[in-house]
Image (cartoon, helix red, strand yellow):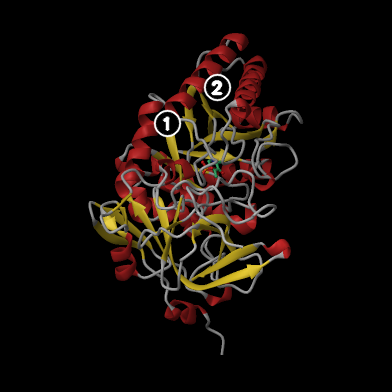
């Protein structure tokens, strides 16, 4: 049967293969604005340009796979939060992507920074982030990490358990420190996101439960501690959240808890932290809210609940990670093989294997996360075909993009760009199959600089000290 391709009116049958959210593309060469660093475009020869540099040139210079971070875009997203939330403290979640240079950008943009481990603290401090602007998170901070944080003068420790309270007190006693703390609570909100990244419902490892009474007990315990200055309540309800409803419930429950604390102690807690989790566009189907809209919604909810509970408005903070680092980053891969796999009913899925995979982006395998992609080195007039972009690892689940339309002529040697790759890709990367991890390259005004170099086989060999 011959198809006549008139304005895309007839196309291949992907029924049952194409997810509902994935639209037949009008123009495969178009770069949807919300997915890419601001200013990303194609040059006159169709090559994608990020941060003023052609991805073809960047790939030639730095190799693939690689992560390119548009510095101006990253800084603009910091500034966007700073300006949309005036008077709030903004903690960039370092776990989403952290290098010394990135810590410096965050510091220069006037933001604070969340860390979770000794490693993240060391990188943040080495990048020039002042210790007093660090928030120290984690559900199992070691005594060594707590001592180090206190010695450095960390801004605040977000307490996650009663064992940790004892550990902090012991460190304060031994080192002659005082600790500024917040208590992380679980509000019972189940954010509408993947199960593994919804963190405020009750049956999980983080925080102290409000409904179980541990949250109030933890707050009172810290309040009476001779070693602690209790700053307030911390709530983080999950990640990749688009609706404000979950935050609304969290605000009501945390402020109700603040009211109960006031009743119990006569003291008003000075601060409330609402955590991060603000969703970004990984695909055309994602519709993040502008930060100004988030801010307005939060302000209104907080005003309303403070009035209801007779509380003064506390100092406020949030902790965006991916909303800053995610869209600023683009991953580049080289196509190694293309395979059309025939399925029942005469349908075909095209498997495109690239030179990375689950070792440099585990999110699709871990959370069934979706991404999009574009041909980076050229445009194409070929018809769209439904593709699956897969990695080079020994796992059937080594999928980078489950469903994406790419041109039918994608060939070995082409470059595939994956937007939204700044967050939780390199930071969660592994050496699975003994693959060296890709570099993180900063791009600014057409120039690139290595923030995190590519791992080498020598690096891997040096770790292997057995005989
Ligand atoms: C992961 C995390 C964040 C950031 O989440 P994003 O989805 O990257 O915004 C903020 N706060 C806490 C406590 C977290 O664990």
Res 89 label: 1
Q: Is mark 1 within 8 Å of ligand 1?
A: no
Q: Is mark 2 within 8 Å of ligand 1?
A: no
In the rendered image, the quadrant that contains the C terminus is bottom right
Q: Is residue 321 visible in the rendered structure shown here?
A: no
- Residue indicated by mark 2: 269
Residue 207 appears left or right of 424: right
The answer to which image quadrant residue 466 occupies is: bottom right
Q: Residue placed at 45% from the left, 60% from the top?
A: 382
Along the line of sight, the residue nearer the viewer: 465 or 94: 94
- Image position of 386 with respect to 153: above or below: below
- Image position of 76 with respect to 402: above or below: above
Q: Is residue 167 visible in the rendered structure shown here?
A: yes
Q: Secondary structure at mark 1?
A: strand
Q: Position of residue 130 (x, y in %)?
A: 35, 44
Q: Residue placed at 68% from the left, 27% from the top?
A: 216
Find the distance from the CA under tag 1 to the CA under tag 2.
Answer: 16 Å
């Amino acid at each position: 049967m011959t198809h006549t391709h008139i304005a895309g009116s007839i196309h291949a049958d992907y029924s049952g293969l194409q997810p509902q959210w994935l639209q037949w593309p009008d123009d495969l060469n178009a770069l949807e604005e919300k997915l890419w660093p601001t200013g990303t475009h194609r040059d006159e020869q169709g090559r994608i340009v990020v941060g003023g540099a052609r991805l073809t040139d960047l790939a030639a210079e730095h190799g693939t796979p690689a992560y390119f971070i548009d510095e101006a875009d990253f800084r603009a997203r910091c500034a966007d939060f700073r300006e949309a939330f005036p008077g709030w403290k903004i903690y960039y979640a370092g776990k989403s992507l952290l290098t010394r240079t990135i810590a410096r950008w965050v510091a220069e943009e006037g933001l604070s920074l969340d860390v979770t481990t000794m490693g993240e603290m060391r990188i943040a401090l080495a990048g020039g982030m002042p210790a007093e602007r660090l928030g120290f998170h984690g559900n199992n901070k070691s005594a060594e990490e707590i001592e180090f944080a206190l010695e450095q003068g960390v801004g605040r420790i977000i307490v996650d358990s009663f064992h940790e309270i004892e550990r902090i007190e012991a460190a304060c006693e031994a080192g002659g420190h005082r600790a500024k703390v917040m208590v992380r609570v679980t509000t019972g909100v189940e954010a509408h996101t993947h199960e593994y990244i919804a963190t405020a419902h009750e049956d999980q490892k983080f925080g102290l439960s409000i409904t179980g009474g541990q949250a109030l007990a933890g707050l009172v315990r810290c309040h009476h501690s001779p070693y602690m200055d209790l700053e307030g309540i911390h709530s983080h309800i999950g990640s990749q959240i688009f609706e404000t409803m979950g935050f609304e419930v969290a605000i009501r429950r945390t402020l109700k808890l603040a009211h109960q604390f006031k009743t119990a102690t006569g003291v008003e807690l000075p601060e409330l932290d609402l955590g991060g989790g603000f969703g970004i566009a990984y695909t055309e189907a994602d519709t993040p809210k502008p930060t100004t809209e988030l801010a307005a919604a939060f302000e209104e909810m907080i005003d309303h609940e403070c009035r209801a509970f007779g509380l003064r408005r506390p100092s406020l903070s949030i902790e965006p990670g991916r909303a800053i680092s995610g869209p600023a980053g683009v991953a580049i891969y080289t196509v190694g093989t293309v395979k059309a796999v025939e399925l029942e009913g005469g349908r075909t899925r095209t498997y495109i294997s690239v030179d990375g995979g689950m070792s440099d982006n585990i999110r699709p395998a871990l959370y069934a996360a979706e991404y999009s992609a574009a041909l980076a080195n050229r445009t194409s007039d070929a018809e769209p075909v439904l593709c699956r972009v897969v990695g080079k690892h020994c796992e059937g689940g080594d999928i980078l993009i489950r469903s994406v339309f790419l041109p039918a002529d994608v060939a070995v040697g082409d470059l595939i760009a994956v937007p939204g790759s700044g967050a939780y890709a390199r930071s969660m990367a592994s050496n699975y199959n003994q693959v060296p991890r890709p570099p993180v390259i900063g791009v600014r005004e057409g120039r690139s600089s290595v923030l995190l170099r590519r791992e080498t086989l020598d690096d891997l060999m040096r770790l292997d000290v057995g005989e």
